[in-house]
Image (cartoon, rainbow, N blue to C red):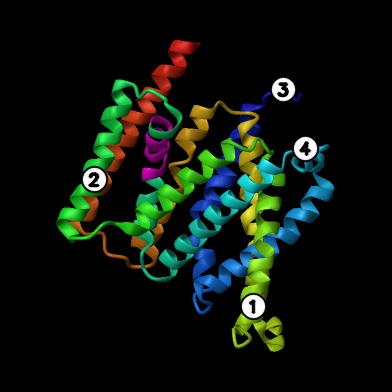
Amino acid sequence: MTAANPRRGYILGLTAYIIWGLFPIYFKLLQSVPAVEIIVHRVLWSALFGAALLLVWKHPGWWRELRENPRRLAILALSGSLIAFNWLTYVWAVNNGRMLEASLGYYINPLVNVLLGMLLLGERLRRLQWVAVGLAAAGVAQQVWQVGSLPWVSLALALSFGFYGLIRKQAPVAALPGLVVETWMLVPIAIGWLLLNPMASSAQPEFYTTSQALWLMAAGPVTLVPLVSFNAAARHLPYTTLGFLQYLAPTLVLLQAVLLFDEHLSSSTLVAFMFIWAGLALYSVDAWLSLRKRA
């Protein structure tokens, strides 16, 4: 096993989270393509690019392990459906002026993970974790009270990604082989969608002479490069350090929403964000204290 290299870990971690944080710029380039069609191509090109990566970046024995454990294949089919729903919600949000809600969803996500661990895995919450989750719930409740409706985009993103992580824990497969299997299981649905929608722009041969086609094909590397970087970073950095870095992506999305794409940050939304940020600050302090105590 290679020795931990914190400097390399930080570079790889920052690479992953900065790419994830800049996703809105990429998806805005595809704004003329419907969200479902973008996800169809994201599945297809991720499957192809992932398979090519697996030929280069060897994971000995991963396919044999899956073949001998059909339950893991069933779990990956379920987790693949969840990640496709997450992708679809995110792309729709970015291309429909709901980037602030998307950003809020990924701020809520770590606290949703804590809550799911308590409700479904029997984990006990520490005192600061209870306060952190309570502050996040207060932020969501404030949005419901002010806006009169649930911030469904935020909750859909946070819950789908939270359940995705929870389900993947039940199938101990390395990240790249796992994602490749998930996407290949979605390939028949993606091809079926293209066959059932012959008038879709990407179903026309002339579409592949346009720059839009190249941007759609780029969905494969755009999806997998940050994932590979993240998993390499995880081998060189403590998990709590990665936990702090994860706030970089939604912060970049928030800044782009307000500064680049003129989304209005209302005072009520800002109050909700402040509740979430306070919860995250407590969550991070608790994680740091817990790590210190174990050390």
Is 207 drawn above or below residue 117 in the view shown?
Answer: below
Residue tagged by mark 4?
A: 65
Looking at the picture, which amino acid does disc 1 mark? Leu
Q: For mark 4, give the secondary structure.
A: helix
In front: label 2 or label 1: 1
What residue span does the magenta drawing correspond to? 108-118
The answer to whether the residue labelled 3 contacts the one labelled 1, judged by CB atoms less than 8 Å apart, is no
The answer to whether residue 224 shows anywhere in this view is yes
In front: label 2 or label 3: 2
Looking at the picture, which amino acid does disc 2 mark? Gly
Seen as rendered, the residue at the extreme left is 145
- Choose the circle earlier in sequence order: 2 or 3: 3
SS majority, magenta: helix
What's the mark number on residue 258? Answer: none
Looking at the picture, which amino acid does disc 3 mark? Ala
What's the mark number on residue 139? Answer: 2
- Choose the circle earlier in sequence order: 2 or 1: 2
Q: Is residue 221 left or right of residue 294?
A: right
Cα gap from disc 2 to disc 1, whole angstroms: 40 Å
Residue tagged by mark 1?
A: 194
Cα gap from disc 3 to disc 1, whole angstroms: 46 Å
Residue drawn 62% across the image and 81% down it: 196
Residue tagged by mark 3?
A: 3
Q: Is residue 129 magenta?
A: no
- Choose the circle earlier in sequence order: 4 or 1: 4
